[in-house]
Amino acid sequence: MSVDAIVIGAGFAGLYAVHRCVAAGLTVVGLEAAPSVGGTWYWNRYPGARCDVESVDYSYSFDEDLQSDWTWSERFAAQPEILAYLDHVADRFDLRRHYQFETDVVGARFDAGQWTVETSTGDRVVGRFLLCATGCLSAVNRPDIPGLDDFAGEMYYTAAWPREDPDLRGKKIGVIGTGSSGIQAVPILAEQAESLVVFQRSPNYTVPMPNYPWSSADLQRIRDEYPERRQRSAYAAAGTPHGTYHKNALDAEPGERLDAMWQRWRDGGVLFAKTFPDQTSVLEANDIARRFAEDRIREIVTDPAVAEDLIPVDHPIGTKRICTDAGYYATFNRDNVRLVNLRREPIEEITEDGVRTASATYACDVLVFATGFDALTGAMTRIDPKGPDGQRLSDIWVDGPLTFLGVMVPRLPNLFSFSGPGSPSVLANMALHAEVQVDWAIGLMVDALGRGITEVEPRRDAALAWTDGVAEAAERTLFPRAQSSWYLGANIEGKKRVFMPYAGGFGNYRKYLDDVAQRGYPGLVLTTGVAW
Ligand code: N01
């Protein structure tokens, strides 16, 4: 089969990419490992999975009718509703017919002006352009803990939760991992379990998510203000309409600061990570917000020793992804819940019937791994595309991810990668981020095809300059101080430690993309050499 464009993935970016290809008159085939659409929202169906960006913002903006026809039921949508939304989008724009589902991409090679993609079904698909909408949080991290294979009970990964929700009522559950996924799942699992042991290697900061159903008045107000809301999001730092408090923490009086922090805490969710403009860049300002959050932990958790164990010690607040929860800290006041601090008593092995740490053995019927992802690069390096001179992505990224504008990679012509390193990605609203990157890629593809250009590839010096800029943007923030963060690849053994997302803001990023397109794509080599 030979097409203009091959799209890998059927999440936010993949679905939109297929839609835009079709609208541009290109032939396209989509390849998706899951049996249906949804991407990360297909797989992450663990109890409590919910998005921490408000539903009305965490949705496509490209089609006003779609936007006004779809009604979100809650302020923060749960996984089933987001999946239903993406299902609706796939049906509404008739996207499924372009996809081959249950099809893993196992290899990709560029030769003679086109990509040949090999799949787990034994097919080969040939296309001029390869659009990798493979996701930034999709390559599951399955830790190699001694004895894992000996465990006789049930084992689940939050990031690959079974479609048929397992019945965990009355069971002894162990949860390994306390990032956003573990923190969301724990309060619900605690209600179901006979006993719940939370194995925590690193504590994280989490902010309550004050969720509520949208009233019809809320929805009417949002519909009325949608154009303005989207306008504000389009060039905002995180791709949402929310800003920071109007003053730096260090410029505000203590009482004023406290009021601002309480306001943010009650508004809930990730926004607390940037209450003040200087919070993510000045340690003294960050400390003010950090101490406020730590006071909340000590207030909620009744056992002071447990409270201290739940307080992070290794990073400024918000420099690892801040979590949002529905009663996480209060869960540790329950009689059936126990926190195990793995920094004090590391896991030594998993046994047939539980987990043995350096100090004790914990009996478990069920183990839930909320151990995260080989984030940002893992989905791409697992495919490891090969360029025309035989160089693989893993060779090109041996010293860390090298990209042009977070979308293209030198020596891999006609390849676009979405939501990956070098782009704001996980620091921004993924729905709008997908639109911006895909629009840029389709714009370039259409331009190239119109001019008879067969190969588009970033120059190495342009990619180096962009990647240096990504590093400089990170250096202007406190993010690199979180040395154990997956933003730096620290959770994956052997992974090069580089701060991967572009921390200069979604709005600025978008301006770079706009500017490069308007100036006729400086930084790219455009070749007309190969006849299709
Ligand atoms: O993954 P994580 P996640 N032994 O990497 C621990 C988004 N998201 O799936 O920190 C013991 O954050 C690991 O410990 P440590 C969001 O961007 C959003 O929870 O490496 N523990 C850590 O505690 C988020 O940041 C939403 O020391 C081990 C945990 O597992 C991102 O996805 C919801 C271990 C992994 O945490 C990833 O979140 C969910 C081992 N061998 C996710 N290996 C919302 O929108 C790992 N850990 C709300």
Image (cartoon, rainbow, N blue to C red):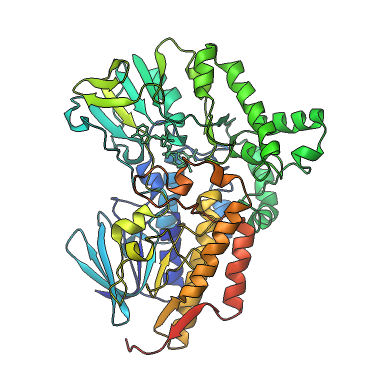
User: Which quadrant of the rendered structure holds the N terminus?
Assistant: bottom left
Residue 114, horizontal then vertical, whole percent = 31, 78
Above or below: residue 468 compared with residue 519 = above
Does the rendering let one see residue 203? yes
Residue ID at (29%, 17%): 171
Q: Residue at x 40, y 22 (%)?
A: 344
Left or right: 329, with 94 as reference point: right
Q: Nearer the viewer, residue 64 or 389?
A: 389
User: Residue 424 location, x and y as percent?
Assistant: 54, 55
Residue 208: where, in percent of width, then height? 57, 29
Quarter assignment of residue 341: top left
Report the side of 96 relative to 81 (left or right). left
Q: Nearer the viewer, residue 314 or 219?
A: 314
Q: Is residue 142 shown above or below 393?
A: above
Does residue 104 appear left or right of residue 336 in this picture? left
Q: Residue furthest right?
A: 253
Q: Residue furthest top?
A: 335
Q: Which quadrant contains ligand 1?
A: top left
* Residue 62, visible in the rendered structure: no
Q: Quadrant of the C terminus?
A: bottom left
Residue sitting at 45 percent across and 68 percent down? 408
